[in-house]
Amino acid sequence: MSTARDPVVADGYSCAVTDLGYDTSVVIVGAGQAGLSVAYYLRRLGLDPGNDVVLLDRGPGAGGAWQFRWEALRLGYAHRVNDLPGMAELGLSFETADRQEPAKRIVAEYYRRYEEHFGLQVVRPANVTRVEELLDGFRIRFSDGVGEQSVTSRILVNATGTWGAPFVPWYPGLNSFEGRHLHTTEYVDAEEFRGQSVVVVGGGTSAIGFLMELERVAGELVWVTRRPVEFLEEQELDIEAGSSAVALQDEAARQGRALPSIVSTTGVPRSRRIQAAIDRGVLVATPVFSRIEPTGVRFPDGRFQRADAIIWATGFRPELRHLASLRLREKQGGVTVGQGAAYRNSRIFFAGYGPTASTIGANRAGRTIARQVVATLSSLG
């Protein structure tokens, strides 16, 4: 355990003690696309990774949430993955990556090389469990797989994303189901459901991906959604639709409201693969059931659908449990964030939250947040 004046030793390196007795100037929690982007720009602005900036990441390796995605997911099937800032310096780009390789492997390898090239010195595994406010800084407590550790910092950048906070809506009878419940985070392979009756819940690209993988594997396959799915004529999300979704996310973040679903505001582009599945009759959604029974689901009209498994592709919520003691949440359910900074504490920044959750949004926000962090440090003397 570190003290206010002791250096933190983790993953084979120590962090120098800064002035005012803090271990480091900036702690970034999360080394996915958002955290790496902020770290890159802080490095460009003169802060030294491992001394002035410490990155804590709970994953066993590089890749952020992508390292945990299912094996069958390919880059060509997923939302577009934009390059991290400075990635061209390594001669890497997701635009030219092998579309037939699992996305999790490509992203993990590219991020690993990125971290090494820029010397970002990510501390992992480092599962942050609690952040405590000090007089003019923070104590960040985390588990490194061996024991409990802590590091103190003047600035906190939260870049934890959403993967660690899966959302499953409640329905009557949810706990009575005798089959298998699983969320997107638990999905591994379609073969697990061979010959079974499967209900897929959700209107986004993950649900659609599961349906196409299960099409010739499951014995019976039913898709249910809470709202009608809009299939766009475009093969990719256009700039106007994307900008509109980001604006809605930004508005919610600025007002401290719960963040809206991206797909509910943009629709689903008709890629060739998705259009082919529509033509085959695979992607036909049914309005969601009204209750769950031990052996299946019951629809409002009384119709019963037997199910061995229910796959909940129902999205995520921002992962903020470790920040609970800071009391940042509003009554509306969200955290008030404007231009990346928390309204209730100007020394806390959010990267990958709301409008900055996409890869392109994270890259742009990384530069803005890094500049604000440096300005805040300067103002603190």
Image (cartoon, rainbow, N blue to C red):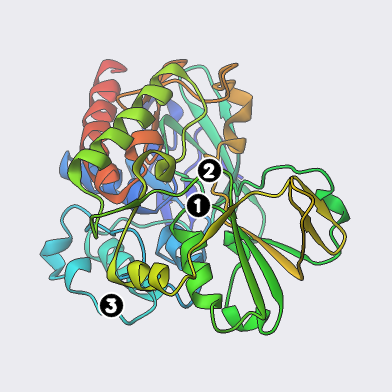
Please state which amino acid type lies under the numbered disc 2: Arg
As helix, strand or loop, the secondary structure at mark 2 comes to: loop
**64 relative position to 147: left or right:** left
The residue singled out by tag 3 in the image is 99
The residue singled out by tag 2 in the image is 227
Q: Which mark is residue 104?
A: none
Residue under the image location 56 percent in, 18 percent down: 330
As helix, strand or loop, the secondary structure at mark 1 comes to: loop
Q: Could you give the CA–CA distance between mark 3 and mark 2, rounded to whole angstroms?
A: 31 Å
Nearer mark to the viewer, of 2 and 1: 2
Residue 78 seen by the camera: yes
Specify which label sits upstream in the sequence, 3 or 1: 3
Specify which label sits upstream in the sequence, 2 or 1: 1
Residue under the image location 38 percent in, 41 percent down: 352
Residue under the image location 51 percent in, 61 percent down: 284
The residue singled out by tag 1 in the image is 203
As helix, strand or loop, the secondary structure at mark 3 comes to: loop
Q: Is 114 placed above or below 134 here?
A: below
Q: Is 271 placed above or below 175 here?
A: below
Local packing at callout 2 (Cα closer than 10 Å; few below 14, some 14-19, many 20+) is few
Local packing at callout 3 (Cα closer than 10 Å; few below 14, some 14-19, many 20+) is some
